[in-house]
Amino acid sequence: MSVKSALTYDINEAAVALGKTPATIRNWIKDGLAVMSSRKPYLILGAAIQEYLRAKYKAAKRPLGPDQLFCLSCRAAQKPVGMSVTIGRISQRTSLLKGVCERCDGVCTRMIATSTADSFAAVFKITKEAGSEP
Ligand SMILES: [Zn+2]
């Protein structure tokens, strides 16, 4: 974590400090990261970023098995029906696996590093999502 708690950052500065894209920071703001003003340019206190990320990592501490996705309805790790998933590119580095929860038929997803897609292909039957980049 490379932001300083007492400094303020605009979206671009925060993105650079954290090695993220400005779009990611904007998503965090939509997701609840506290900004100091309701108008642009948004200024974010470093301490708010640290607190947001701590909470985010805590929430993410639901480890998934190698053969599991996270079901949004069950709010738990589940296997997809038929071990079949689609893959869609979210960003250059990140892809999203999407399947149908075998317990509730809801949508289950798993964010993966695109570079690890091959290892997931050994576990899941992966098909490319229509219209997405390979
Ligand atoms: Zn489910």
Image (spheres, rainbow, N blue to C red):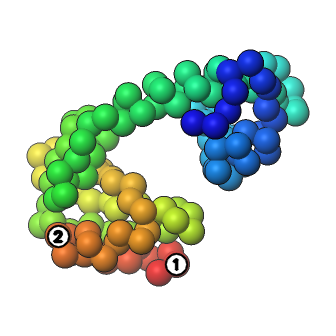
In this rendering, would 90 be left or right of 58?
Answer: right
In this rendering, would 118 be left or right of 28?
Answer: left
Q: Nearer the viewer, residue 80 or 106?
A: 80
Q: Nearer the viewer, residue 10 or 17?
A: 17
Disc tally is: 2
Are there few (<14), some (14-19), or many (20+) residues within 10 Å of tag 1?
A: few
Residue indicated by mark 2: 123
- In this rendering, is residue 98 above or below 56? below
Question: In the drawing, what numbered circle is on residue 133?
Answer: 1
Q: What's the residue type where badge 2 is placed?
A: Val
Q: Secondary structure at mark 1?
A: loop
Are there few (<14), some (14-19), or many (20+) residues within 10 Å of tag 2?
A: few
Q: Nearer the viewer, mark 2 or mark 1?
A: 2
Image location of residue 63, percent across then percent down = 24, 42
- In this rendering, is residue 70 above or below 2? below
Q: CA distance from mark 2 to mark 1?
A: 21 Å
Instruction: Give the residue at x 27% y 60%.
Output: 99
Image location of residue 83, percent across then percent down = 15, 66
Q: Secondary structure at mark 2?
A: loop
Quadrant assignment for the N terminus: top right
Instruction: Decide if residue 73 is in sight here.
Output: no
- In this rendering, is residue 72 above or below 3? below
Instruction: Give the residue at x 88% y 33%.
Output: 41
Q: What's the residue type where badge 1 is placed?
A: Glu
Instruction: Give the residue at x 42% y 33%.
Output: 57
Instruction: Decide if residue 20 is in sight here.
Output: yes
Instruction: Give the residue at x 48% y 62%.
Output: 94
Quadrant housing residue 123? bottom left
Quadrant housing residue 38? top right
CB-based contact (under 8 Å), mark 2 and mark 1: no
